[in-house]
Amino acid sequence: MYSVITPTTPAEFERYYDLRWRVLRKPFQRPRGSEQDEYDQVGIHRMIVDDSGAAIAIGRLHFNSPDEGQIRFMASAPEHRGGGHGVAIVYELEKVARDEGATHVIINSRDNTLGFYIKCGYELVEEADTLKNPSAEHQLRKTLTEQNRITYRPDWCKELQDTWHEDIPISETMGIRIQQYTGRAFTTQAMLSRNINVHGTMFAGSIYSLATLTCWGLLHLQLRERQLHGAIVLADGAIHYHKPVTREPIAVAHVVDMIGDLSALTEGRNARVTLKTQIFDGDRPVAEFSGQFVVIANKKEA
């Protein structure tokens, strides 16, 4: 299990700065101590740790002005890259920037991380001449709006949200909205007031629909990540209701729970995958859904 923390103790900061030095300074033969600067005393720090407390990913936010936040010193342990930890750090730091009233966030990036930040919704505003200076940094910017509160692939998520409301009208009637996508997890939310029964709780059918659509959405985004195409249909589904939903429900689906092989699509064959969704009432899990989906291959493209 991984968790996001704010380092506070000397031991936590030691692990935090050690990872920063190992990833961002050691490869360039920079000495210990060069990984810190004067903004560390006033910055906001976040660190992802595993069950043993080891540092997995880190990042810092400081403010250049009341309107402008800057994210710096993003680093992930090499053995843990690809797990969505970098996106989780960006999400946490952006959330602080929003809460503090910043209107935008800037990030300086080398070539090797430029694509990552663009996928997180940042726009290139100042391109560095990396031909003359390979270590030069580009500057990226994100204006913080309600529309781009989704950290990863916000443009894809907007397109998906629009598709739901246009092609699956019940999703808009239920008040279903995409809350967050990190590349590894997909979170949606529905309005309780539009799905309430005579007992003041959420209709069981509405819970089932929310869970199904969440799995469908995660699979849709993962197909785009892999540049694969096909029509997604639900073949079978089962849900277990543990407790009633009494407030705005949250549904979460994780890539790690996806079972199946999508590579058949590249050969013009249908693919079958199983996905899971948990429904939360606040912080409490109240229902679990498991669905078997078929992705019908696009024969012409194959």
Image (spheres, rainbow, N blue to C red):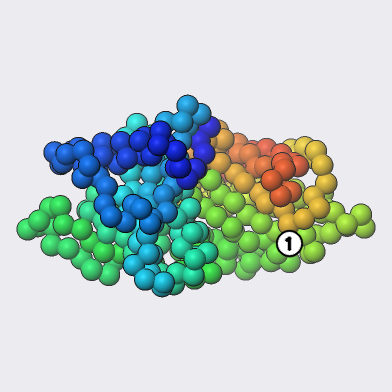
Question: Residue 266 appears in which quarter of the rendering?
Answer: top left
Residue at (82, 42) in percent of width and height: 243
Callout 1 environment at 10 Å: few (<14), some (14 to 19), or many (20+)?
some
Mark 1, residue position = 191
Residue at (92, 54) in percent of width and height: 199
22 with respect to 151 (left or right): left
203 with respect to 270 (left or right): right
User: Which amino acid, mark 1?
Assistant: Met
Q: Is residue 300 visible?
A: no
Question: Residue 61 appears in which quarter of the rendering?
Answer: bottom left
Question: Residue 119 appears in which quarter of the rendering?
Answer: bottom left
Q: Is residue 96 above or below residue 125?
A: above
Q: Residue 181 at x, y = what percent?
A: 52, 53
Q: As rendered, which of 212 and 99 lies closer to the eye?
A: 99
Q: Residue 146 at x, y = what percent?
A: 53, 69
Q: Residue 201 at x, y = what percent?
A: 85, 54
131 with respect to 239 (left or right): left
Residue at (32, 40) in percent of width and height: 17
Q: As rendered, which of 92 and 101 lies closer to the eye?
A: 101
Q: As rendered, which of 167 and 153 lies closer to the eye?
A: 153
Q: As rendered, which of 106 and 6 lies closer to the eye?
A: 6
Q: Residue 113 at x, y = what percent?
A: 28, 51
Residue at (62, 46) in percent of width and height: 252
Furthest-left residue in this view: 132
Q: Is residue 135 visible?
A: yes
Figure disc tally: 1
Question: In what element is the residue under mark 1?
Answer: loop
Q: Is residue 65 above or below residue 244?
A: below
Furthest-right residue in this view: 198
Q: Is residue 68 above or below residue 75?
A: below
